[in-house]
Image (cartoon, rainbow, N blue to C red):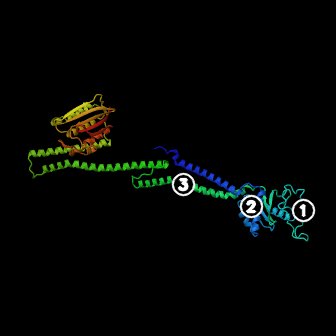
Amino acid sequence: MSDPVWYRSLYWRIAFGFVAMLAVLLLVQGLVFLWLTDQFFGAPRTPTQLAAQIAEDLSAELQQHPDVDLEKFVPRHFSRIYQPFLVVMQDGRQASNRPDALPPDMGRVVTWHLRFESGTNRAPGDFPRPHPDGPPPDRPEFDRKPPFGPGPDRGNAMPPPPAGFGRRGGPRYPVEYAAIKVNDQQLGVVAVPANPPPVSVALRVIGPTLTWFGLGLLGIGATFTALLVFRPAHKRLSTLEHAARALGEGRTDVRASETGGDEVTALSRTFNRMAIDLDTRAKQLAEADRVRRQLLADVSHELMTPLSAIRGYVETLGMPNVPLDQPTRHRYLDIVEQETHKLEAIIGDLLDLARLEGGGDTLKVEAVAVGDLFRRVADRHQPVLRERNITLAQHIADATPRLRGDAARLEQALQNVAANAIRHTPSGGRIMLDAARDRDMVCIRVRDTGPGIPPEHLPRVFDRFYKVDVSRAGTAVPSGSGLGLSIVRAIIERHGGSVLATNAPEGGASFDLRIPAA
């Protein structure tokens, strides 16, 4: 059995399915990442533009709904904005879209600026910004030290600035501001850090979405892979499992599906060959058992006939009250002797056939001349041939080699075929013995001018105890035991040859014995 084609192999299909699923997963994840990036980041905007846009949106919302809850509105309405920002109102309310992404102390810084700005005459949005190296020389308001706490001059004073604000070592992040105004009245500010947030913020924003998308795509890819790669193999494995279970229950006619062309198909083919072998052996065992039963019946029948005759005549001869004259007694004894010889012949043929078919008989292999076999056949059957006026013709082609085999066994086979031909050849008929070379074999053909063999009986003429005498016309000699042709086949096959029975075109039966040449 050849190996499966590589692209049909289950292992390659699993590998390709995994690679394809991984490629699709990465592609879709990349597209989702780009989509999320576009949703969160949108068109590139500067912190100043972003602050102005947010302040404009909040101004419009506060004008329509002055009592809006900024802590809920800002995270919900500006959730798609990736850049964190802080909204600080004059009344102290604060809101942010991403509070955890704001720089540290940004709330206090923006609150201080808002309150500081409310006491000066500055243009809207012109808020002071921390300087990385301390207060600028032209902004003395950074060094103002107003009184804190209640007093007769200021009442509730402005809270102190954050620690280190505006000085070396203080907060060093630039912030863009935009005023939130309603009816030209400033209600608060929007503060947007000029620097982008750290990468961890982006991971917190788009990480969960990408994770859920990835898990969903992984589940879908695994499902499609299972349906396209593993389901057909699982289905055929289930069929193979059911077939194996049925075979274990004794049903040798079951077969597994051989579709697919992968390793499962190769396994199914191996299983089917095993099932076919088991089915063939089961049928052979059943046929052997039938043949054994038939042989026992045939042997019993063949042995019972002479035994019954012997028993009948012996009982007759032993009866004291039955007077028998001397000629009658001798005739009965002759019949008993003939039946005894027939019984011995049947038993001898059975033993001979058993030895040949069982391989217990040792052949003495030598070079045997075909002419010697033909001469011994003619000498043995000469009285019968002369009595019935049957002509025995012999012809050996030129360059016919000797036979390789046991001379005695080959003579026995040829004698049996010749005796069968003489038995079924009418008086005045003709028997031909021909021999010729056929490659590395020698073909010996025995033909007669009898009625031939009916076609329906040709396949079984070499079976044990099989007789077709009732279908032959002109038979003048009683049938034999039915074992002669079986012994012929066993002898020829033991020599590595073959035997074939046919009907000659000109009439009569023809037996071809093919024997290896020496």
State which tag comes first along the sequence, 2 or 3.
Answer: 2
Cα distance in 3D space between marks 2 and 1? 32 Å
Pair 3/1: label in front: 1
| Residue at the farthest front position | 183
- Residue 335 visible, this angle: yes
Callout 1: SS: loop
Residue 217 vertical position relative to residue 501 in the rendered view, above or below: below
Which is nearer the eye, 403 or 71?
71
Q: Is residue 367 visible?
A: no
Q: Mark 1 points at which residue?
A: 144
- The picture places residue 378, in percent across and down from the top left corner, at 21, 33
Q: Label 2 is placed on what type of residue?
A: Asp
Under circle 3, the secondary element is helix
Q: Which residue was labeled with disc 2?
A: 100
How many labels were placed on the picture? 3
How packed mark 3 is, by other alpha carbons closer than 10 Å (few <14, some 14-19, many 20 or more), is: some
**Disc 2, SS:** helix
Note whether 144 is above or below 363 in the view shown: below
Residue ID at (47%, 43%): 2
Give the percent coordinates (x, y) of residue 356.
30, 41
Residue 338 locus on image (x, y percent): 17, 43
Residue density around tag 2, few if under 14, some if 14–19, many if 20 or more, within 10 Å: few
- Measuring 20% from the left and 48% from the top, which residue is drawn there? 305
| Nearer to the camera, 100 or 37 | 37
**The C terminus, quarter of image:** top left
Task: Please state which amino acid type lies under the numbered disc 3.
Answer: Ala
Q: Decide: marks 3, 1 in contact (CB < 8 A)?
A: no
Which residue is depicted at the point 51% across and 54% down? Answer: 231
